[in-house]
Amino acid sequence: MLGREAEIDRMLKELHASYLKGNEHDEGDLIYYRINYRLADTFGITNEEAERLHSSYHAANPRQVSQGDCEKCGRVVTIIPVIYGIQESDTERMKAAEMQGRLIIGDMSTVTQGSKLPMFGCKSCGTLLPKYGTLW
């Protein structure tokens, strides 16, 4: 069994290196859950077990997320992704994630050719923060 634990630990290190690509300060919820899903799929374990193993990994390697300045809040806040164009089948799950403060569902009526769309927003108040990146 120790061999499997070593394999899981090795994979956690590889997944973090791959998904974070040298930016260890940016393990937001989307990346965190993506790593959990890969662990569950690769080792044939439940999502709950994968989350437990991933959380255990972070006991020794604290998880960090990106932060930025929100002018509306007047302080440094955690930034979360803005998701545009969600599929009908994902609507309920995405709205639940938005209610939990894990992401912001972008307004599709603002999507026009040539417009710049903010990629991130403030987790505290939901203000869009284009200074931290935009999509065309």
Image (cartoon, grey):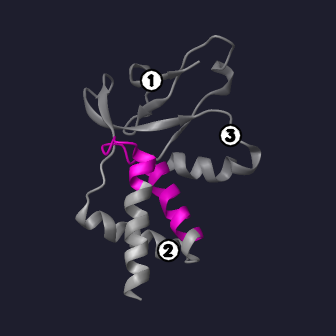
Residue visible at 54% across and 75% down? 43
Picture quarter with the N terminus = bottom left
Decide: is 57 above or below 70. below
Label drawn at residue 48: 2
Q: Is residue 52 visible?
A: no
User: Magenta includes 34?
Assistant: yes
Q: Which of the two discs, 2 and 3, labels the residue nearer the N terminus?
A: 2
Q: Magenta region: which residues?
A: 16-41
Q: Indicate the amino acid at tag 3.
A: Ile
Decide: is 100 above or below 48. above
Q: Secondary structure at mark 1?
A: loop
Whole-percent x and y of residue 77? 30, 36
The foreground one among 80 and 38 is: 38
Q: Relative to residue 116, is residue 74 drawn left or right?
A: left
Residue visible at 31% across and 22% down? 71
The foreground one among 74 and 38 is: 38
Whole-percent x and y of residue 64? 30, 49
Give the prevailing secondary structure in the magenta stretch.
helix
Q: Which of the two discs, 1 and 2, labels the residue nearer the N terminus?
A: 2
Q: Indicate the amino acid at tag 2.
A: Glu
Picture quarter with the C terminus = top right
Label drawn at residue 133: 1
Q: Relative to residue 112, is residue 21 drawn left or right?
A: left
Query: What distance separates the C-alpha of mark 1 from that of mark 3?
Result: 20 Å
The residue at which mark 3 appears reads as: 86
